[in-house]
Image (cartoon, helix red, strand yellow):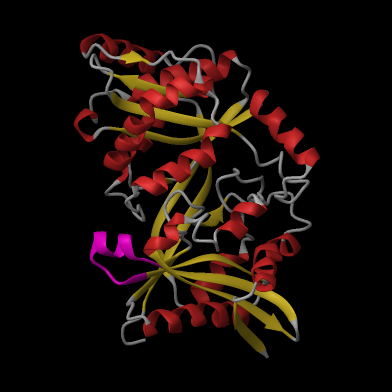
Amino acid sequence: MIEIKEVKTKKDINTFVDFPNKLYKDCPHYSYPFRSDEVGNFNPKKNLSLKDCEVVTYLAYDDGKVVGRVQGIIQKAYNKKVNEKRVRFSRFDCINSVAVAKALLGAVEAWAKDKGMEIVHGPLGYSDLDREGMLIEGFDEMCTFEEWYNYPYYKDLVEACGYTKDVDWLERKIYPSKEVSPKVARVADIVEKRYKLKKVEIKSKREFFKRYKDGIFEVLDQSYNDLYGVVPYSKELKEQLFKQFKSFVELKYCCVIVDESDKVICFGVSLPALNKAVYKSKGRLTIPAIFRLLHALKHPEVVDFAIIGVRPEWQNKGVNSLVLKYIMQNMGAYGVKYCETNLCLEDNVKINQTWEYIEHDIVRRRRAFVKNLINK
């Protein structure tokens, strides 16, 4: 008999956070998040997204043993933006059992109905910068640090619970070289001269962020606003995200393009890959793990292309080719073997076309599922 219990105590939270460690203990492809971040998600002082969210968290037990977990998240800011009554399911993990999956997702659905919600979709987190999407293709190698890995049977479980495809994302492996694609280089040179654009050359992180942090977030807001799952960011949340990521940013793998007035019009951010550095410690920041992180940050063989953004009025003018040109050149110059992109919606034609002129492979596909609760 499957028993569902709501997570309420500190002990429950630890059990919830640590369940994947047991489920994936023999899986070399699982990418552990920082454990402290996952525990911190339950603390409103550390997870500012909770201001815009109602959250419920469940554990599934079978004969006293934990066999699954799930969260339900009502993202109020997102629902207001899209004018829908949606609840997200997040951090869904369970053994290969339809009964467990139905019990977990059924608990979220019952909670959602009680809250007046009409649609369940996911996996999605507190915001679009949280880990999201269920892996449905590409199970044979480790995921990036920024995304979840899951076993192939997850798709069958959620479909057995009545969920269908909402959207798919693609992830690519990009192969940089010192010689950028002639077409990308040609377009970049033309755009740079025609619009009198330039790449920011500041080497000091402090000075770089002081001058361009606000502009980067402004471009992020404008260029991602209409995409699936994207949540508006408050000033406080932006500051929190900045503090979380600034230590992992290496400027040589990033690019900011500005106009004549020094206004940010386009940017790309890549981060040294951290997945292997935290694997042995299972996401705990032990002393050996910290040394591995420091080495990965300074001498990466792989980087993760985290995000690229272009102001709407500058889109379709080829300015993204400047970002690709400079980032690819630096990756090649510093001996990076390849970079992996994070999620890109399969119907985001502009971004998908960007990669056509660079050597790449599509290595993973992720899916957000959806279920209508009306008359269910």
Does residue 161 appear in the picture of this structure?
A: no
> Residue at point 50% right, 15% down?
203
- Please state which of residues 319 and 128 is positioned toward the viewer in this rendering: 128
Task: Tell me the quarter of the picture where residue 111 sits.
Answer: bottom left
From the viewer's side, name the closer residue of 151 and 224.
Answer: 224
| Above or below for 196 versus 130 | above
Residue drawn at x 69%, y 69% as measured from the top left: 15
Q: How many marks?
A: 0
Q: Image quadrant of residue 62?
A: bottom right
User: Residue, x 24% and y 11% (percent of image)?
Assistant: 196
Q: Nearer the viewer, residue 209 or 216?
A: 209
Q: Position of residue 72 (x, y in %)?
A: 47, 71
The answer to whether one can see residue 16 in this image is yes
The residues colored magenta run: 74-86
Which residue is farthest bottom? 1
Question: Is residue 59 shown left or right of residue 263?
Answer: right
Q: Quadrant of the C terminus?
A: bottom left
Whole-percent x, y for residue 101 in the image = 58, 77
Does 39 lie within the magenta span? no
From the viewer's perspective, is residue 9 above or below residue 253?
below
Residue furthest to the left: 313
Q: Is residue 154 left or right of residue 52?
A: right
Residue positioned 44% across, 84% down in the render: 110
Residue extending farthest to the front is 45
Whether residue 81 is in magenta: the answer is: yes
